[in-house]
Image (tube, rainbow, N blue to C red):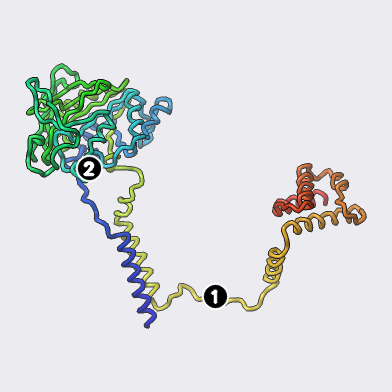
Amino acid sequence: MKDRLVTGAGALLALVVVYAMFFQRETPVQLERPLSTEIGPSGYSAVRTWLESSGVRVVSLTQRYDGLEQALEETGKARGRAGAALPASGNVMITALPHRHVARVRETSVLHRWIGSGNTLLVFAALDETPEWSAEPGGDWRPQLSRLTDLAFAVHEGADDAGQPGAGSEPGAGSEPGAAPSPNRPVRPGDTVEFVALAGHPLMEGVDRLAARSDRESAILYPYPNVMQPLFRLAVESRTGVDAVWQQRRQDGQILIVASAAVLSNRNVAEADAGRFIANVLKHHLGDGGAVIFDDMHQGLSSLYDPAAFYGDPRLRATAAFLVAAWLVWLLGSSNRLAPPVPERAAPRHGDFLAAAGGLLARRLDRRDAGLLLLEDWFDEIRRKHALPQLEAPPWAAIDATPALRQPTRDALRRAYERLRQGRPVDLCRLHNHLREAREAVG
């Protein structure tokens, strides 16, 4: 009884150690993300449903941008998730920033080549408003946008008479979310940010304004001028006059940047002309057979291995609990044996003797001597078969006169014999196989 108590105490201590090592971790709060499958206020499922009901092909990208490289390498064709062919150009990708899984440098370069081959990237970035999901810890996310667009962004601090942004602070300046409102953060929680369309651009045909409600306090940002990457203005923020929607050409494709990540959200998409804006983008940039690709992977919906999702799966916990319970029952049950013990044989058999003798010889006999003994035994068989005198020299003449023995085998046996005579080792298994073939040929 005392042994069982000690065993049970040890088992419980082991369980406590395993639990402390692997299961004592904080589970982060999973906020709604701008996913094409998310039906909450922050999701993009309303836009996806509208596109599918309109006959537009929709693809959910659940892998990194590296998969788009097939569009450049496979004769103008790439494979989508369902295996249907996508054209190399004429596609429109929708992505929202900040990303939950940051794009790597290599996949960003692949994305740029994909855009340059005639595709469109539509970026909805939380620049002028701050959705709840974008305030997760992780530092300044604007370098993500800079890698995608090759643009740097600064905080707007004022406007001149022409309505253009004045000198702003460096990217990253400004107070943290939740601080008291300041001139650098003119958008308060609950405020609606409006983008007024500029006339004359075909993408803004029939669009009066785009609007989104900010969950947290936010600044107004604008991009630094870049002579290498000229921008076309499509809309401005209504209160400050700062540019809010841009178009950037990339060889045969383009990048469209909207300074709000919530314009397409289920909560805000119907409040203004976001639907008309998307329709114009598809009218001018969606090619025949092209698809609208939702970048769901970088917002957390990935077909790749996710350790957090694996360890958070309740089925894993149920399986672990069952195994622990079965282990405890076996450990503390009436018997610690799952089967009766098999009695050991006391009397050795002939096979045991042969195995012991062979093991002894194998340990004591040099491998080179063993190889010579194998060859000498075969030579003696040849001499007896052909009535040759017992000479020290091998009967190579009688062996060479055997037509059934292949020349490669004869050469291999000669080389092995010469090596062994010189005191050099050979592969005994290969020598044994050659001798067996020679015996079968000589008869």
Dot 1 amino acid type: Val
Q: Which residue is mark 1?
A: 342
Q: Residue furthest top?
A: 200
Q: Secondary structure at mark 2?
A: loop
Residue drawn where x is 20% and y is 31% of the image: 153
Q: Quarter holding the N terminus? A: bottom left
Could you say where residue 340 lies in the image, as x and y percent from the top left? 50, 76
Q: Quadrant of residue 406?
A: top right
Residue drawn where x is 42% and y is 77% of the image: 335
Could you say where residue 150 lies in the image, as x and y percent from the top left? 27, 28
Q: Nearer the viewer, residue 377 or 80?
A: 377
Q: Please give left or right for residue 88 compared with residue 166 in the image.
A: right
Estimate how packed mark 1 is, as few (under 14), some (14 to 19) or many (20 or more) residues with alpha carbons within 10 Å: few
Residue drawn where x is 32% and y is 59% of the image: 22
Up/down of 274 relative to 373, above or below: above
Which numbered disc covers residue 139? 2
Residue drawn where x is 78% and y is 56% of the image: 372
Q: Quadrant of residue 188?
A: top left
Could you say where residue 21 lies in the image, as x and y percent from the top left? 32, 61
Q: Earlier in the sequence, mark 1 or mark 2?
A: 2
